[in-house]
């Protein structure tokens, strides 16, 4: 703890630091002030039937040492299960890659279909993403492998589900696909992310031509580096006036200032320019406030780059869903429902945990089962409240 005598000195050095860096806040306010003329009001749209389909992968981990089982479950906001798998940090990724395909080589899962359509060769998860370890590395040196790769696998499954819904299903009505997170990723190798974006754009154009249905893609983030950087400046400049929901497009140069790696702000508009290709970005960023008051939350929203000119229409459709958001106010209800369906807790969690225990018992025999049951009883007893 601070000694009371040290507090005046601490207060002084903090104020001096703020005075020295005041120019930085002034620059941020100047950058935000330049956007004031670009702010637009969100007009609610109800004339066209729009289905808000949000995919969400729950982060469900079942632990009983020495096993850490990650349940990969992706569902939409209607409760339809789109992906179900289980992995552990020591799962052989070569076998996991083969599980995405049938014996004849045809895709068996959404991720397998994405691997095939992207032309990944050989058809392994490691070739799709460098963040997935090779099977050989896991088999030979499992203790040296970072367990975080299972979360990368979960994110790849989410992208694969989104890709499959757009490219292999024709919606019955105009549809907005809402992703939990921005439309950008550094998980993919080479130009695979660009290829996936182009295939989705092609499918969206085909659906509109053949069925006259409109399909939109957006990604929403509760937090982002851009929002953190400009949050104070927006409040001081009064960027979003009271009275109506509003949004504003964030130019790429302001995005780049917020990121450590500027390539995370290089979009499709730079494909014909010299330099590195836009390998990680599929959307144009907007800051959006669906509420009417100055204290209402502001979200970072990516609109599919090829649909950025239709942003007003997209936000108009999202508005009603965001107004109904609960328990997080003014956050799209479809995303909150998807997350609720994807998460496993209470009785469902007990069922899954029991399945882990039963699978463990199948590995044991005789007195080993008795010893295991004693450990399980002791764990249950210690978890009880008194």
Image (cartoon, rainbow, N blue to C red):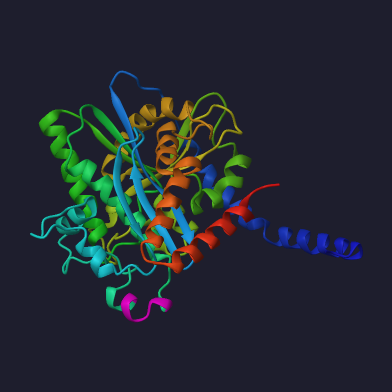
> Residue 15: x percent and y percent?
77, 58
Kindly tell me whether residue 283 is visible in this rendering: yes
- The magenta region covers 138-143
Q: Is residue 141 part of the magenta span, yes or no?
A: yes
Q: How many marks?
A: 0
Q: Residue furthest bottom?
A: 140
Q: Residue furthest left?
A: 104
Front position in the image: 382 or 268: 382
> Residue 19: x percent and y percent?
73, 58
Residue at x 22%, y 41% (from the top left corner): 166
Q: Is 141 on the left or on the right of 173, as rendered?
A: right
Q: Is 267 on the left or on the right of 360, as rendered?
A: left
> Residue 110: x percent and y percent?
22, 50
Location of the N terminus by quadrant is bottom right
Q: Residue furthest front?
A: 366
Q: Is residue 128 part of the magenta span, yes or no?
A: no
Kindly tell me whether residue 39 is visible in this rendering: no
Residue 308's place in the image compared with 72, above or below, is above
> Residue 293: x percent and y percent?
58, 28
Magenta stretch: dominant SS? helix
Residue 354's place in the image compared with 363, above or below, is above
Residue at x 86%, y 61% (from the top left corner): 7
Front position in the image: 237 or 139: 139
Based on the displayed image, in which of its 4 quarters is residue 130 positioned? bottom left
Front position in the image: 35 or 189: 189
Q: Residue furthest right?
A: 5
Residue 321's place in the image compared with 69, above or below, is above
Residue at x 28%, y 39% (from the top left corner): 307
């Amino acid at each position: 703890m601070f000694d009371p005598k040290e507090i005046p000195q601490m207060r002084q050095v903090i104020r001096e630091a703020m005075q020295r860096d005041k120019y930085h806040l002034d620059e941020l306010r100047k950058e935000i002030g330049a956007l004031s003329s670009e702010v637009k009001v969100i007009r609610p749209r109800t004339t066209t039937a729009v289905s808000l389909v949000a995919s969400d992968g729950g982060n469900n981990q079942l632990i009983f040492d020495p096993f850490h089982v990650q349940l990969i479950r992706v569902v939409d906001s209607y409760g339809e299960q789109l992906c179900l798998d289980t992995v552990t940090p020591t799962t052989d990724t070569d076998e996991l890659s083969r599980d995405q395909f049938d014996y004849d080589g045809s895709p068996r899962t959404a991720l397998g279909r994405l691997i095939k359509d992207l032309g990944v060769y050989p058809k392994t998860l490691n070739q799709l993403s460098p963040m997935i370890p090779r099977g050989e590395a896991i088999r030979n040196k499992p203790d040296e492998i970072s367990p975080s790769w299972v979360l990368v696998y979960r994110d790849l499954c989410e992208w694969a589900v989104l890709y499959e819904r757009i490219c292999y299903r024709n919606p019955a009505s105009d549809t907005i696909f809402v992703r939990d997170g921005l439309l950008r990723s550094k998980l993919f190798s080479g130009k695979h992310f660009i290829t996936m974006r182009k295939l989705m754009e092609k499918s969206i154009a085909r659906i509109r031509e053949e069925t006259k249905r409109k399909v939109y893609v957006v990604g929403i983030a509760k937090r982002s580096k851009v929002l953190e950087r400009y949050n104070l400046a927006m409040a001081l400049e009064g960027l979003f006036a009271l009275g109506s929901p509003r949004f504003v497009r964030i130019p790429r140069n302001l995005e780049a200032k917020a990121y450590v790696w500027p390539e995370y702000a290089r979009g499709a508009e730079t494909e014909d320019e010299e330099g590195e290709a836009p390998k990680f970005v599929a959307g144009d960023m907007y800051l959006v406030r669906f509420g009417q008051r100055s204290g209402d939350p502001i979200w970072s929203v990516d609109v599919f780059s090829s649909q950025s000119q239709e942003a007003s229409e997209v936000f108009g459709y999202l508005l009603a869903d965001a107004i109904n958001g609960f328990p997080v106010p003014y956050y799209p209800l479809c995303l909150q429902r998807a997350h609720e369906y994807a998460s496993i807790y209470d009785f469902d969690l007990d069922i899954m945990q029991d399945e882990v225990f039963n699978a463990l018992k199948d590995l044991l025999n005789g007195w080993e089962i008795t010893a295991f049951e004693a450990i399980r009883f002791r764990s249950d007893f210690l978890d009880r409240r008194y």
